[in-house]
Image: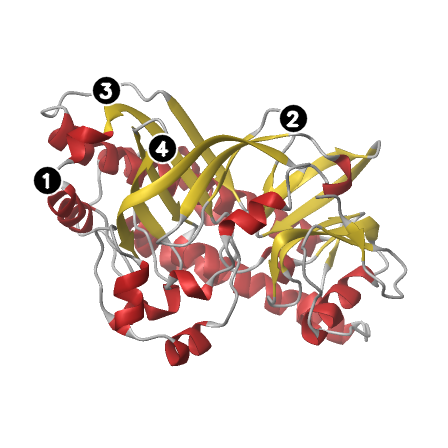
Amino acid sequence: MPYEKLEISTPKPVLSWANHALGDKETKMATNVASLPFVFKHVALMPDVHLGKGALVGSVIATKEAIIPAAVGVDIGCGMMAVKMPFNANKLEGKLKQIRLDIEAAIPVGFAENKEVEKSVTNWQRWGDFKELHQGVQRQDNKALKQLGSLGGGNHFIEVCVDTENSVWLMLHSGSRGIGNLLAQHHIDTAKDLAKLAEISLADKDLAYFVAGTPEFAAYWHDLQWAQDYASFNRDIMMNRFKKIVEKHLAGGKVTKPLLQVNCHHNYAEKEVHFGEDVYVTRKGAVRAQVDDLGIIPGSMGTKSFIVKGKGNVESYCSCSHGAGRLMSRTKAKNVFTLDDFVRQTDGVECRKNEEFLDEIPGAYKPIEEVMSQQSDLVEVVATLKQVVCVKG
């Protein structure tokens, strides 16, 4: 589906790949961003677009000489990792519950952290840069150390999946944990303070920004890259443990070689070249989809997920959606659905079926097939997955 240009009056246009009209609050948020003086060319909205903080989740914002820390968000580097294993799905028979229990024993979820720190974590090369991070996190080094290799909460998850060819996949979704959140909050507060001091008029205070060439911009950019690396390595650590668990059950503990591996951010910012110019690209709930880039687009915990290859669509700043996107808020989901609904909608999935996960029920998300149909010009599907085990944060 090609994009459409939103009928709003802004200095820079907004191109949307969503097949639905934006609500008033969403339209206002898109208008606010597209009215900023440093936004480059246009704003791109992905098919899973929905309300966020400052900027819409599912938006791609290219900027010249400035960056908005709240647009990147507080879960810096949040993203996905998937590994195709050399196993047929029939090997999983009768083992799903024990695999789930082993995952939950090996990988901390929610606010939990690792009780012991493994050597690969202590040897991470970026620990040497910790003392250069924002002074507000300097007492968090031990917590950051213990949280490296933990899932977190909310919509983060770990899944065993099976593709249409009956191959086993391992997939997980997580970010930069407490340290990324704290770094983001400190820099967002600094940006807001600077806007107030400079008497900059903003339609939304969460659109406070840093200007390139200033010490505040440099400090944020440094911390942002560190947190993005932390998030990526966090997924590596968890996947390594996850892989060992599955190998124990399916290969008698024998180490196997993955057939395919993908690790990608969907809440981050990078320097890129678009339309022949150097820009800062913020993907707030979007995946990079340059030509042949491999990406991951998960559905909800009871639906399909997709491994995709980018087509390099320039109008989307070479991006695609990061998932199905929420259809309703967490609070509304808990009010609308019951535990019986949850059990029914996650039928066939080995997971903890209790009311604490009602806000993650599949019915609270947009149908993933619709989202995929709206971005056939952005990506092609490499593999279609369906989870058989799901561990939520």
Q: Secondary structure at mark 1?
A: loop
Question: Callout 2, which amino acid?
Answer: Val
Task: Of the two numbered discs 1 and 2 on the same chain, state the one appearing first in sequence.
Answer: 1
Q: CA distance from mark 4 to mark 3?
A: 19 Å
Location of mark 1 (residue)? 94
Location of mark 3 (residue)? 256
Q: Secondary structure at mark 4?
A: strand
Task: Of the two numbered discs 4 and 1 on the same chain, state the one appearing first in sequence.
Answer: 1
Residue 172 at what x, y percent from top left?
Answer: 36, 44
Task: Of the two numbered discs 4 and 3 on the same chain, state the one appearing first in sequence.
Answer: 4
Task: Of the two numbered discs 2 and 3 on the same chain, state the one appearing first in sequence.
Answer: 3
Q: How is the image coloured?
A: secondary structure
Residue at x-position 52% and y-position 47%: 369
Q: Quadrant of residue 362?
A: bottom left
Q: Does 371 appear above or below 312?
A: below
Answer yes or no: is residue 222 visible. no
Location of mark 2 (residue)? 291
Q: Nearer the viewer, residue 336 or 79?
A: 336
> Which mark lies nearer to you, 4 or 3?
4
Name the side, left or right, on which 262 lies relative to 106. Answer: right
